[in-house]
Image (cartoon, grey):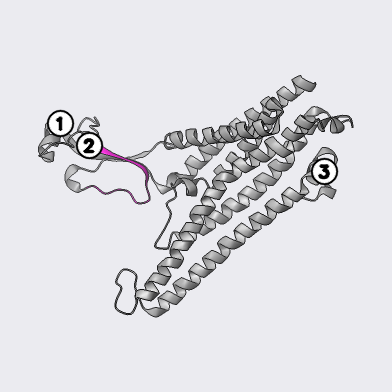
Amino acid sequence: MSALALRGPARVVVLQHRRVLWTVGALALVGIALVGVAWWVTSAAATTFAGTGCSVRHTVHGCGIAVRHFLSVELYFSRLLAYAGVAMMILPAVIGLFVAGPMIGRELEDGTYRLSWSQSVTPTRWLAAKLAVPAVLTVAGVSVLSAVYAWAWSRGRGTNYPAQWFEREVYGAMGPAPVGYALLCLALGALAAVLIRRTLPAMAVTAVAYAAVVVVMNAVRSGLWPMRTDTPALGAGLRYPSAASDVAVGWMTADGTRLGDTTCIDATDVDACMARHGATSWYIDYHPASHFWPLQLVETGILLVLAAAAAAVAFRVLRRSHG
């Protein structure tokens, strides 16, 4: 985003924080390049290993070094994806802290906002510019990072150390949810800054609020979309669905009553115990991989509603204080 193409408060925001914006952009490019190089090294190692004629599962004499080297490269790539996922989960908090601190909180604490307001810029327009610029950059930047992570994760699924889609650091780094979390933290940072008007306390409140949102969403995520249920007969054997999340297993009677997986846990004769309780089948509740997008979209919708509400309250507080 060129500062020359902007007008008014938005241009001032970019000029004020151009060094931070350039630094963040450079770090994002470095991260993308690191992931790309890591996959190139992993892919090259796989090609080299395939040419040796060795096998990971059926290692023969003379293949030990080649197998260990190949697995080490894949393990490093898997760890890099895990670290990248954690970084993507921390990124929204960084955005919120920046907004609550240097972008809004410090100006309200030091009183420098009066300079802008004395130049025919209303408090509402001032805050709108403070939020619009980082919001546009956040949506664009986080979307690109999320797409790059999804690409790398899809490549990593073919390795010996695949990460599952429902793992927190994976789920939180792909799809639209990272954008939703980033926008929510942006709004929370603005609200905290407007309410508290002190930099460090506003940043602390923003961090705590983001942590609370993450804890709550992780706790309720499995209920955001109906689970799928399989009911295999007892004699048919129990097979867990592939790549399934939130698996709950137990016994079920003919009339659909669930007994729970601990009903016969202490029984010496499990079959007799199940027969005594009238169990005729298993039940398996789970989210298949196809539920990734419904879960992501519902969660993102909730986050955007919360972000809009926080931003609306911030504008209202600012108008009442300086209307």
Q: Name the residue under label 2.
A: 251
Q: How far apart are marks 3 and 1 (CA)?
A: 72 Å
- Circle 3 Cα neighbour tier, 10 Å, few/some/many (<14 / 14–19 / ≥20): some
Question: Which comes sooner in the sequence, label 3 or label 2?
Answer: 3
Residue 163 image offset from top left, x and y in percent: 43, 54
Q: Mark 1 points at which residue?
A: 277
Q: Which kind of residue does numbered mark 2 sit on? A: Trp
Residue 188 image offset from top left, x and y in percent: 63, 32
**Between 312 and 89, the one nearer to me in the picture:** 89
Residue occupying the point 78% across, 45% down? 14
User: Given contact means CB atoms under 8 Å apart, are the residues at marks 3 and 1 in contact?
Assistant: no
Residue 143 image offset from top left, x and y in percent: 61, 49
Part of the protein shown in magenta: 238-250
Q: Is 16 on the left or on the right of 69, as rendered?
A: right
Q: Name the residue under label 3.
A: 11
Kind of element beneath mark 1? helix
Question: Which comes sooner in the sequence, label 3 or label 1?
Answer: 3
**Between 285 and 124, the one nearer to me in the picture:** 124
Q: Which kind of residue does numbered mark 3 sit on? A: Arg
